[in-house]
Image (cartoon, rainbow, N blue to C red):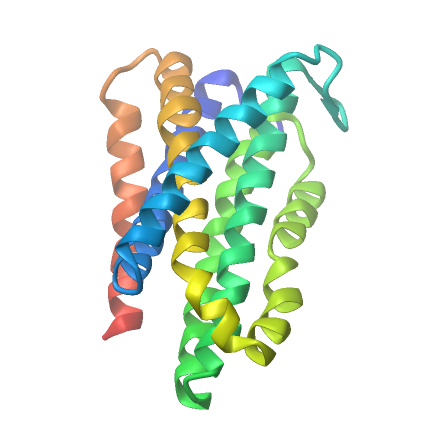
Amino acid sequence: MPKPGRYWLGYGNAAAAGLMLAASGQLVYEGWHQSPGRLGAGLVAGLLFIAASRWLLGRFDGVRVGDLRGADARKSLLIVGVMTIHSVAEGVGIGVSFGGGAELGLFISLAIAVHNIPEGLAISLVLVPRGVSVWKAGAWSFFSSIPQPLLAVPAFLFVLQFRDYLAAGFGFAAGAMGWMVLRELIPEARKETRSTWRPLVVAAAAAAVLGVLQALLRA
């Protein structure tokens, strides 16, 4: 659909919300087993960061991303920013996992690589219906994962120092994505589709698909 209407934009938001919610759940699961306290601090910090970013972007009427203006541009910036922050935590996770041995490191790297597919899809589901070309949306998806290889190496070299803060990083990313899901994507999906429950069903289905994928990777 080269020019989907606002109705389909709502379902795109719902699907992206489900994927992000499942990814957030995985981060919380990993962080809880490392340090519940640091995880909680990271969650709060992530929520506050996105709330502050949303407030700051709302003060500038001239925000633009390519051909996007206003609310669509602000939402696009937030979604790409959130997913990039998410990749920072994952990049550190890759480096730290190799500190526990090559076998563990390869498994974690494979799991995150597979996760990058639906995470890139989540970005595209938000950008493409708003008028961003498929190629540009793909480029933004690629950009959002750049922190992973950049941070994996220093995290491996300084694994002991990074390991202590990994739970907080997971919490920060999960909190940021949770805010986007609950305060941005789901409310807009319900508004655009003019339905209370159908977007929730789409979001739940998308989360279930990623949840099954996560379970298969752990098996």
Number of marks drawn:
0
Q: Is residue 6 visible?
A: yes
Which residue shows up at 50% across the image and 57% down it? 89
Please determine whether, in this image, residue 204 is positioned above or below residue 144: above
Please determine whether, in this image, residue 125 is positioned above or below residue 144: above
- Answer with the quarter of the image where residue 137 lies: top right
Q: Is 6 in front, or is 25? A: 25
Residue 211: x and y in percent read 27, 55
Q: Is residue 1 visible?
A: no
Residue 152: x and y in percent read 58, 71
Q: Is 32 in front, or is 132? A: 32
Residue lying furthest bottom: 102
Which residue shows up at 62% across the image and 75% down it? 153
Which residue shows up at 48% across the image and 76% down it? 160
- Does residue 33 appear left or right of residue 93 in this picture? left
- Answer with the quarter of the image where residue 214 lies: bottom left
On-image quarter of the N terminus: top right
Which residue shows up at 65% across the image and 23% down it? 73
Residue 178: x and y in percent read 37, 36
- Does residue 199 appear left or right of residue 52 in this picture? left
Q: Is 45 in front, or is 180? A: 45
Residue 102: x and y in percent read 46, 89
Q: Is 133 in front, or is 123? A: 123
On-image quarter of the C terminus: bottom left
